[in-house]
Structure formats: structure tokens, C-alpha cells
């Protein structure tokens, strides 16, 4: 049989307050076509369906619309969905009984039995081939929250024990998880979009995944990688931040093949996902440019009406010494150009003399620009003012102006 592994969709996500719905919709259309052409028997989605626990309606529309389309086009496809650290376990589990009738098995989180032990019953999912034979028994373990290392290990031990007891002698064993596996390429994690987790799931030993498990499908890290034998991260389907723009994104195809006298084995193929929107960092992610250079590069872009979903997402890294006034000027220059997002990041690592960059006079600068510049200095790791803070400041300015009048 053939299974597809994907994870970390983050439906409802934004990039610098700009929705990513267009890219997600294009990915879902591509994924549906891939499932049709590849003759898959099942798909496993290893957590972080949504970007947060209370996703916007547009994210729910994408999710349920895609499920309905897949059920219509692929009535025999089996779907397994686990909760991630960004998801609400309760939200995923609420329609579980209804979805199970449609061959969609969701495990948002693990409940507790009367003795206080985790209820692993919902994690056991038999996957069948086209002939109706159980070829895989899947332990669909979701994000385990702030568990201790011992608790994480014990959950997997109990799930694997139950899988071994339930699986036919020739069926493959398969696990899921949403965690940070020790040994994964942590240095290449995206601090912009991979939320830190606490407890054992933040540094889980790959030893919790036994050798007789043919494949472990993990979520949480956005960089596709294989931290151990038969253990894989599929990664996110689109770059969730500019720090993720330099590597290819993918899904994984898992072919389960029989082994004489033993359990079936898994053979993995990486399938690259076409990028629907180009992401660019000027001049590069490791260099910076002057305001004049940035202005010239923007001027060289072709004209176009703003708002086209397929146009490039652009980030500019300005050399230290640039100000909020420079940022605002570049924003204005880009309004009529063929780009969908212009994010200007001012480098802070280079020290320049006071007279290196001419400064605007305070009386020529609006309170909004002064506030944005002050915010950037106070919050270098969060240079864009949050919408609620910006709204509160605008309200305060308006009230002050009214009093002065």
C-alpha cells in the first residue's frame, strides 16, 4: 500500500500580517491532484493543521473544504490527523465521531482513563490496502503537551505494545509524533514560526521509536529531515517565514512492501512541492543594502496594481543607520510595483557614526513614525508594531489632538 506523510500546514497563518491563504489553497489543490495521480491508500497529517488554537473562519473554510473535496474525489482514501502544539486538541476532537464515519481519523490529544493513565485507544488505527487487508497498524500519537521525558517514553511504549498485539504478523508498524526529536537539525529550526515547547516533547530521544517500527511520521520542525533510521520530518508545505525560503519543501511517499517471513517494510520517496509564490530577500539573508540601493531596485520593478496574490513576497535588509522614515519612503515607492509584500528590516549589528546618516527633523515627522521607530528600538526581535498596539496608539493620538484643539 502507499501512504503520504505531510505536516505543519499552519492554515490561517500570516506573514507580517499578510494572509497566506492563496499559497495554502494552491498547495491543497496540488496535494489533491498528487493523491489522485499517485494512487495513495492513506494520508497522515502530523500536526499543526492550524496556525493557532482559535483559527480564523477562512482557515476552517480551507480545511473543511479540502476534506469535502478529497472525500468526493477519493472515497476510499483513509485520512489520519493528529494535533500539534499550535492546534486546539478539543477543536480537532470535537467532530471526531462524524469524521470517522468518513474514514477521517483525528486524534487531537490524549484523554485520561479512570486510573489517570493516558487513553491510548484512539491512537490505534488499522490501515487497509485496496483489497481490504490490514497492511499497517498506525499508532497516531499527537502532541503530548508539557509531559516529562518519562511520560513521553511511557506513552510510546504503551502504544507500541498495543500495536504489536493488534497487528497481523506481516503488517507494518507505523508511528506519528509532534515533537522535537533529539538529534534533529535544531540549528536550522525557524525561530520565527516554530513555537518553543516545554517538557519531554522538546527533546525526545529517538530511542522511543523502536527498530521494528517501519516508519515514524513526525511534525513540528519545518525543515524536512531524517533524524534517525525510519524517522522522518515531512516539514511545512510552504515557507512560513523568510528564514525558510532557501530550502525545498516536500511531502513524503511511503510504500509498504511485504517481507517474506516478517513484517512489511517502508520505502520512502521525497516529493517536492512547487512554490506558488516566490520569496526574495534583498540583497540576501546574510547581507544588507543601503536605502539608495533599495530605492533603485524597487524602481526597476515593473508597474502593477497592488494586491495580486501570485506576486513575490519581498523582504529588504537595510544597513544599520536607516530609520523608520526610510522604511516609510520605501513602502510608498513599492505601492504600484509588482510585489505582494514589502517588509523592511533594519540591520542592528553594524555601528555607524552619528553623522553617517542624515536624520529627519522631529517637526517634520508624524507621531506615528516616531512611535514606530521607538518601538523598533525597544523591540528589535519584533520590529513591526502589533496591530492592537498600533490601534491603541492611534486612539491615544486622536484623543490628545482633540483635547489640544
Image: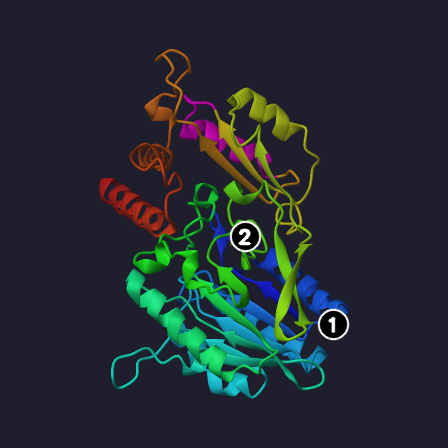
Nearer to me, 354 or 337: 354
Whether residue 62 appears in this view of the structure is no
Residue 177, position as x, y percentages in the image: 45, 65
| Side of 238 where 92 appears, left or right | left
Residue occupied by mark 1: 39
Locate residue 24: give its quadrant: bottom right
Locate residue 323: give its quadrant: top left
Task: Look at 43% across and 69% down and name the residue there.
Answer: 142
Secondary-structure class at tag 1? loop
Secondary-structure class at tag 2? strand
| Side of 146 where 287 appears, left or right | right
Residue occupied by mark 2: 226
Task: Look at 40% across and 20% down and name the residue there.
Answer: 350
Marks 1 and 2 sit apart, C-alpha to C-alpha, by 25 Å
Q: Is residue 322 magenta?
A: yes
Nearer to me, 12 or 265: 265
Residue 71, position as x, y percentages in the image: 65, 80
Nearer to me, 257 or 128: 257
Q: Residues within 10 Å of mark 2 (few under 14, many from 20)?
A: some
In the displayed structure, 152 sits above or below 135; it is above
Which residues make up the magenta segment? 319-335
| Side of 401 where 295 appears, left or right | right
Q: Nearer the viewer, mark 1 or mark 2?
A: 2
Amino acid at each position: 500500500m502507499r501512504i503520504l506523510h505531510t505536516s505543519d500546514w499552519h492554515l490561517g497563518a500570516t506573514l507580517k500580517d499578510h494572509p497566506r491563504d492563496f499559497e495554502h489553497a494552491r498547495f491543497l489543490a496540488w496535494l489533491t491532484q498528487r493523491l489522485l495521480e499517485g494512487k495513495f491508500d492513506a494520508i497522515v497529517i502530523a500536526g499543526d493543521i492550524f496556525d493557532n488554537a482559535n483559527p480564523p473562519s477562512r482557515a476552517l473554510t480551507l480545511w473543511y473544504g479540502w476534506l469535502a473535496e478529497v472525500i468526493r474525489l477519493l472515497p476510499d482514501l483513509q485520512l489520519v490527523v493528529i494535533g500539534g502544539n499550535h492546534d486546539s486538541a478539543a477543536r480537532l476532537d470535537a467532530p471526531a465521531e462524524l469524521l470517522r464515519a468518513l474514514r477521517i481519523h483525528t486524534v487531537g490529544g490524549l484523554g485520561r482513563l479512570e486510573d489517570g493513565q493516558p487513553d491510548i485507544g484512539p491512537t490505534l488505527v488499522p490501515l487497509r490496502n485496496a483489497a481490504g487487508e490490514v497492511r499497517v497498524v498506525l499508532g497516531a500519537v499527537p502532541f503530548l503537551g508539557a509531559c516529562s521525558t518519562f511520560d513521553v517514553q511511557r506513552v510510546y511504549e504503551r502504544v507500541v505494545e498495543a500495536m504489536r498485539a493488534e497487528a497481523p504478523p506481516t503488517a507494518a508498524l507505523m508511528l506519528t509524533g509532534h515533537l522535537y526529536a533529539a538529534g534533529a537539525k535544531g540549528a536550522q529550526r525557524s525561530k520565527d514560526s516554530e513555537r518553543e515547547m516545554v517538557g519531554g516533547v522538546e527533546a525526545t530521544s529517538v530511542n522511543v521509536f523502536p527498530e521494528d517500527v517501519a516508519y515514524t511520521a513526525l511534525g513540528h520542525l519545518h525543515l524536512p529531515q531524517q533524524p534517525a533510521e525510519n524517522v522522518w520530518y515531512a516539514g511545512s508545505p510552504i515557507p512560513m517565514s523568510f528564514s525558510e525560503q532557501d530550502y525545498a519543501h516536500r511531502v513524503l511517499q511511503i510504500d509498504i512492501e511485504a517481507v517474506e517471513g516478517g513484517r512489511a517494510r517502508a520505502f520512502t520517496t521525497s516529493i517536492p512541492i512547487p512554490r506558488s509564490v516566490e520569496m526574495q530577500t534583498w540583497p540576501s539573508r546574510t547581507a544588507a543594502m543601503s536605502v539608495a540601493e533599495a530605492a533603485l531596485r524597487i524602481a526597476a520593478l515593473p508597474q502593477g496594481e497592488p494586491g495580486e496574490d501570485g506576486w513575490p513576497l519581498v523582504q529588504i535588509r537595510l544597513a544599520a543607520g536607516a530609520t523608520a522614515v526610510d522604511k516609510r519612503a520605501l513602502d510608498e515607492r513599492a505601492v504600484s510595483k509588482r510585489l505582494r509584500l514589502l517588509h523592511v528590516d533594519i540591520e542592528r549589528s553594524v555601528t555607524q557614526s552619528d553623522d553617517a546618516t542624515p536624520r529627519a527633523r522631529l517637526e517634520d515627522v508624524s507621531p506615528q513614525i516616531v512611535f514606530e521607530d521607538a518601538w523598533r528600538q525597544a523591540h528589535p526581535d519584533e520590529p513591526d508594531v502589533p496591530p492592537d498596539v498600533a490601534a491603541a496608539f492611534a486612539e491615544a493620538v486622536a484623543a490628545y489632538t482633540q483635547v489640544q484643539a
